[in-house]
Amino acid sequence: MFTFPVEQGLKCRALLSDFLFILPSLIVSTPAPSHIVIAQPALTQQLFLLFHGLGDSAQGLAPLGRFIAAHFPQAAVISIDSPYFCDVAAGYQWYSVQGATEDDRHALVAEQMPRFVDMVQHWQRLLGVPPEATCLVGFSQGAFMSLQSTQQNVFLAGRVVALAGRFTAVPNKPAHPVVIHMLHGDQDTVVAHHHSVAASERLQALGADVTIDVLAGLAHGINEEMAQAIIRRLTSYIPQRIWNEALGAAGQS
């Protein structure tokens, strides 16, 4: 069984394929940056940064990280703790959801975005990997941060893989040259999958490079089918800009 983090309201647990990992209950707001280096080849050509959901930790996405590393042997794969202790459950968070409304979410993410950008750029500098060879993989709150980073005036990553997450507001620009892969379970009651569908349709209308996979029967989590879909998208999807460049070259020949 291939099982990954599940995030449900105030009860956040990391259900792993080989053991159950539950962090001690810590209800404080002290920053706690940490990470797990899952893979770091001698010659690093790609970079995957994994961002977990509310109340989880870097350990929660480690199984997915190992799965990705097995398919990308020339990639560094790093799973990163959110910077603050979670105030509603064990684990960590980017921002508190206590008392937060739908209208608050955009401002909460925006407040933390400079730190998110700095974190991504830190690993790019450290490993010598450019943005175009970087992929951000976020689950739930980690997906919120990863997706919203594509709406900033900075090019952070060539690809973003958003799992059971959403934009905090309707996208207003196409996020070129980023390729966005959105994957979501149709039984998710924490972050409804219709948000991903609506965002993908909006991005496509703006001319963005985006894919959407809705997985039948999956709640708020990651299963083997989703993990396989991630690899399929990353290895077989050709970015639209590549097609455009090829068509342009063909037209000039």
Image: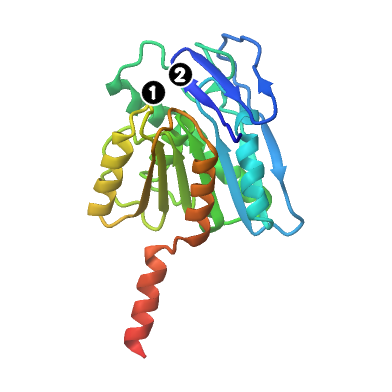
State the residue position of label 1. Answer: 190
Colour scheme shown: rainbow
CA separation in Å, label 2 and label 1 = 6 Å
Q: How many residues crowd mark 2 within 10 Å: few (<14), some (14–19), many (20+)?
A: some
Quadrant of the rendered structure where residue 23 is?
A: top right
Q: Position of residue 84 (x, y in %)?
A: 56, 21
Residue at 35 percent of width and 44 percent of height: 151
State the residue position of label 2. Answer: 8
Kindly indicate whether the residue at mark 1 contacts the one at mark 2 (C-beta within 8 angstroms). yes
Q: Amino acid at mark 1?
A: Val
Q: Position of residue 253 (x, y in %)?
A: 36, 91
User: Position of 138 compared to 180: left or right?
Assistant: right
Disc ID at residue 200: none
- Rendered view: 171 above or below 72: above
Residue at 40 percent of width and 58 percent of height: 177
* In the foreground, 48 or 192: 192
* Image quadrant containing the N terminus: top right
- Rendered view: 91 above or below 246: above
Quadrant of the rendered structure where residue 50 is?
A: top right
User: Position of 22 compared to 104: left or right?
Assistant: right
Residue at 33 percent of width and 32 percent of height: 168
Q: Amino acid at mark 2?
A: Gln
Q: Position of residue 113 (x, y in %)?
A: 44, 34
Q: How many marks?
A: 2
**Earlier-in-chain disc, 2 versus 1:** 2
Q: Position of residue 198 (x, y in %)?
A: 26, 40
- Rendered view: 179 above or below 167: below
Q: Secondary structure at mark 1?
A: loop
